[in-house]
């Protein structure tokens, strides 16, 4: 049996931000949840696709969250 690479979850989402230089979103209920991906490469491709589709709108921003780092860090778990 071949060993599978470690699953490194990444989440991609976006929406309208209050300031194009920041990541404070206008309306959390209106966020566009793109998905959760098993590795950085797949998440980066999804992020790039969504970001490039909004290139003319400075107030729409997509982000990638390294969920695996949050899951591995007991300080971030309640």
Image (tube, helix red, strand yellow):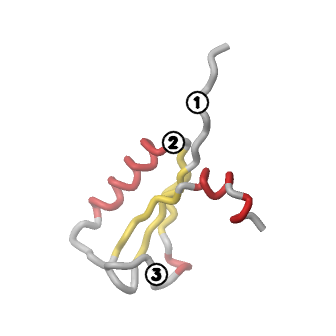
Placement of 5 over or under 14, stated as above or below: above
Residue 37 picture location, percent across and down: 53, 47
Left or right: 44 as drawn, with respect to 57: right
CB within 8 Å, label 2 to label 1: yes
Placement of 39 over or under 35, stated as above or below: above
Q: Which residue is mark 1?
A: 5
CB within 8 Å, label 3 to label 2: no
Left or right: 73 as drawn, with respect to 34: right
Q: Residue at x 58, y 48 (%)?
A: 9
Q: Residue furthest right?
A: 78
Task: Please tell me how crowded label 1 is: few (under 14), some (14-19), or many (20+) other residues with Cα within 10 Å.
Answer: few
Q: Residue at x 27, y 59 (%)?
A: 52
Of labels 2 and 1, earlier in sequence is 1
- The foreground one among 62 and 73 is 73
Q: Which mark is residue 76?
A: none
Q: Residue at x 63, y 58 (%)?
A: 70
Q: Secondary structure at mark 1?
A: loop
| Spatial CA span between label 3 and label 1 | 34 Å
Of labels 3 and 1, earlier in sequence is 1
Q: Secondary structure at mark 3?
A: loop
Quadrant placement of the C terminus: bottom right
Q: Which residue is mark 2?
A: 39
Quadrant placement of the N terminus: top right
| Spatial CA span between label 2 and label 1 | 9 Å
Q: Residue furthest left?
A: 56
| Spatial CA span between label 3 and label 2 | 25 Å
Residue 30 picture location, percent across and down: 50, 77
Q: Which residue is mark 3?
A: 24
């Amino acid at each position: 049996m071949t060993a599978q690479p470690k699953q490194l979850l990444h989440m991609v989402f976006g929406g309208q931000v209050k300031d194009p230089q920041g990541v404070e979103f206008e309306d959390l209920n209106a966020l566009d949840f793109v998905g959760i991906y098993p590795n950085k490469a797949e998440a980066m491709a999804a992020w790039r696709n969504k970001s490039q589709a909004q290139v003319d709108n400075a107030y729409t921003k997509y982000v990638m969250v390294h969920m695996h780092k949050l899951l591995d860090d007991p300080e971030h778990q309640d």
